[in-house]
Image: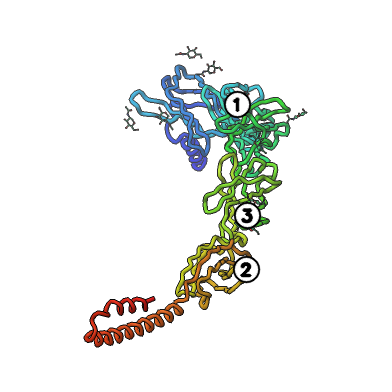
Amino acid sequence: MTVVWRLVLLLLTAAPTGAPSLCSYSVTPIKFGFRIEFSNSPSGDYNIAITEDGRPDIKNTSNVPVSNQTSSHDIQGLKPCTEYKHHVTFLHSDGNVTSCSGSNYKSTTTEMNAGDVKEVNSKPGHVCYQTDWDISSLQSTQSNISPQSHGNKTFCVKPDFNDICSDLVFTSKNCVNAAFTLTKYITAEFLNPEEIKQIPADKLPAEIKAELPPNCNNLSIKYTCWEDGRDNELKTLSELEPFTDYSCTGQIKDNNVLIKNTSALHFRVDCDLTITVTKSSPTNTSVELIWKTTSQKCEDDNLENLSYFCSYENAHRTLGTKLRSGGKCNISGLKPFTKYKCKVQPTYKHQPLKDVTHQDIKTDVGVPGPVTMSLQLQEHNVIKVTCETLQFNGPEKIYMLQVSYGSEIVRNEQRINKCNFVFDNLRYSTTYKVKVTAFNGKLESAPKIESITTNYNDKAVIGFLIFLIVLTSLALLLITYKIYILKKRRTRDDNRDEVFLSTIYSCVP
Ligand SMILES: *[C@@H]1O[C@H](CO)[C@@H](O)[C@H](O)[C@H]1NC(C)=O
Ligand SMILES: *[C@@H]1O[C@H](CO)[C@@H](O)[C@H](O)[C@H]1NC(C)=O
Ligand SMILES: *[C@@H]1O[C@H](CO)[C@@H](O)[C@H](O)[C@H]1NC(C)=O
Ligand SMILES: *[C@@H]1O[C@H](CO)[C@@H](O)[C@H](O)[C@H]1NC(C)=O
Ligand SMILES: *[C@@H]1O[C@H](CO)[C@@H](O)[C@H](O)[C@H]1NC(C)=O
Ligand SMILES: *[C@@H]1O[C@H](CO)[C@@H](O)[C@H](O)[C@H]1NC(C)=O
Ligand SMILES: *[C@@H]1O[C@H](CO)[C@@H](O)[C@H](O)[C@H]1NC(C)=O
Ligand SMILES: *[C@@H]1O[C@H](CO)[C@@H](O)[C@H](O)[C@H]1NC(C)=O
Ligand SMILES: *[C@@H]1O[C@H](CO)[C@@H](O)[C@H](O)[C@H]1NC(C)=O
């Protein structure tokens, strides 16, 4: 008996632990949420808190008025097929609260029906639904995106780039029946041009790769471009030139109907030119260069408007002649037998390009420059010749001399590097012709010819003079002797003076 009593007592006291609760309620799932029905509860204000299991967000309704012992309150905007914990408290007028019996139990919402959701058009580029459910728990089957609350019972989702041109399907993973799905075909209109990746290929003819959503098989993009600053001259990709800045936009067409334009894209291709001199033909005053131009990035046709300038010593520009995939030029005005660094400078529409090529060349042997000569009589019959040329224009430096008298060649001489000749033993008082040329091993300069006359024979004159002096001395001796004889005779005969003197005079020639 006592055991049975104790069990009954235990059962009576255990359930509500002590005194029966001040208030109690029951929860019934209804469309969009729960209905809370109060029973045996005092009139006044209650607080209803609904918590999704394991999530921090709480649906909290404060100051719910309960005016009668049997009153109910609907909580809507909950997620379908979702388990919630509920907690209801009575709010005392002094601020104290009392939990109602039934609190902290769990209930699960109902499934959704197709009619519960209405598609609305409230945000561009988004798919929006209006419903009393909280559909933020739905997930798209392809890309795991969920609608986000947008206020006013509206939920919107921005389709993923890859969802475009395919069905966007939402299901609730909680609803086991899964009878309900939201399906929306995402048209190409949802395409945001900013999201299209555009990759210009660094080559000519021009190409721009645009990444469209994978399912949009009927979409195509046609690009038009314009040179910066000339947006009224539209060009297709195949018309684009190298070394030029363009802006391009693509017209996105759905079965040839224009739907959108892509964002503008900068396009420029700098062809990587390789200029190879294939032939250089020097003369003694010019050189002809022939070169080939190749490019990995650009085709020959795209290089049609290239032009070339040849120069040397960073000056003396000459315009080259265009040949098929290359060009040639004739650099003239060069000095013979001289090394030059020649430059081929490509330009595109007056804009010099960096792909310059240098070629070392040496001009051919030329005629040696003019010779200067100076002649000097070193002695009466010795001629000294010095001469010089400033340019030999060739590998060797030889001076060649010829001394002639009339048609008779008297001497022929050669000297290397220096021109310093002495011709002796020549004839006295004779006019000689001296001819000098410079020879570089291949070519000979114009001759320099001068004449010079040797002096009289000085040795013969001196001999004659000595003879004259001896003769005069002898004559003087004779005169002195004769005067001495006369003086002796005068002492005897003074009168014959005049006659004798005239005799002496007649002796002088
Ligand atoms: C719910 O609201 C009441 C009254 O405004 C507040 O006292 C209580 O802390 C709230 N509960 C939660 C979990 O926010
Ligand atoms: C309580 O509700 C019943 C019917 O639901 C109504 O007849 C009664 O008058 C109500 N009492 C008060 C105090 O409002
Ligand atoms: C409020 O509650 C506390 C303890 O729960 C109690 O001590 C106090 O007397 C209550 N106040 C009123 C006005 O009932
Ligand atoms: C909320 O939606 C309703 C119906 O769609 C509309 O009439 C109302 O203007 C909207 N309110 C706001 C603030 O958007
Ligand atoms: C593409 O175009 C074809 C023919 O116009 C049409 O039958 C097909 O439905 C279109 N596909 C899409 C995804 O729009
Ligand atoms: C796209 O660009 C073309 C010109 O390139 C213009 O005529 C057309 O209006 C643009 N379309 C849109 C949708 O912006
Ligand atoms: C060369 O320039 C002319 C004039 O600007 C242009 O019309 C032509 O298309 C250009 N050719 C190439 C291959 O770019
Ligand atoms: C280059 O020009 C020079 C002088 O203008 C000329 O003598 C020479 O023959 C030319 N060379 C060629 C290959 O045309
Ligand atoms: C170049 O060589 C030719 C013969 O090969 C010659 O006639 C011409 O005068 C030379 N010119 C110069 C500047 O040396």
The answer to whether marks 1 and 3 mark residues whose Cβ atoms lie closer than 8 Å is: no
User: Which of 328 and 51 lies nearest the eye of the viewer?
Assistant: 328
- The residue under the point 56% across, 47% down is 317
Cα separation between marks 1 and 2: 86 Å
**For the residue with label 1, is its CB less than 8 Å from the closest atom of ligand 6?**
no
**For the residue with label 2, is its CB less than 8 Å from the closest atom of ligand 9?**
no
From the viewer's perspective, tell me whether residue 405 is left or right of residue 327: left
Mark 3 or 2, which is nearer the eye?
2
Cα separation between marks 3 and 2: 43 Å
Q: Which mark is residue 232?
A: 1
* Element type where label 1 sits in the image: loop
Q: How packed is label 1: few (under 14 Cα within 10 Å), some, or many (20 or more)? A: few
* Element type where label 3 sits in the image: strand
**On the image, numbered disc 2 is attached to which residue?**
407
Earlier sequence position, callout 1 versus callout 2? 1
**For the residue with label 3, is its CB less than 8 Å from the closest atom of ligand 8?**
no
Callout 2 amino acid? Ser
The answer to whether marks 3 and 2 mark residues whose Cβ atoms lie closer than 8 Å is: no
Q: How packed is label 3: few (under 14 Cα within 10 Å), some, or many (20 or more)? A: many
Residue 186 visible in the displayed image: no
Residue 158, compared with residue 330, is above or below; it is above
- The residue under the point 51% across, 40% down is 7
**On the image, numbered disc 3 is attached to which residue?**
287
Mark 1 or 3, which is nearer the eye?
3
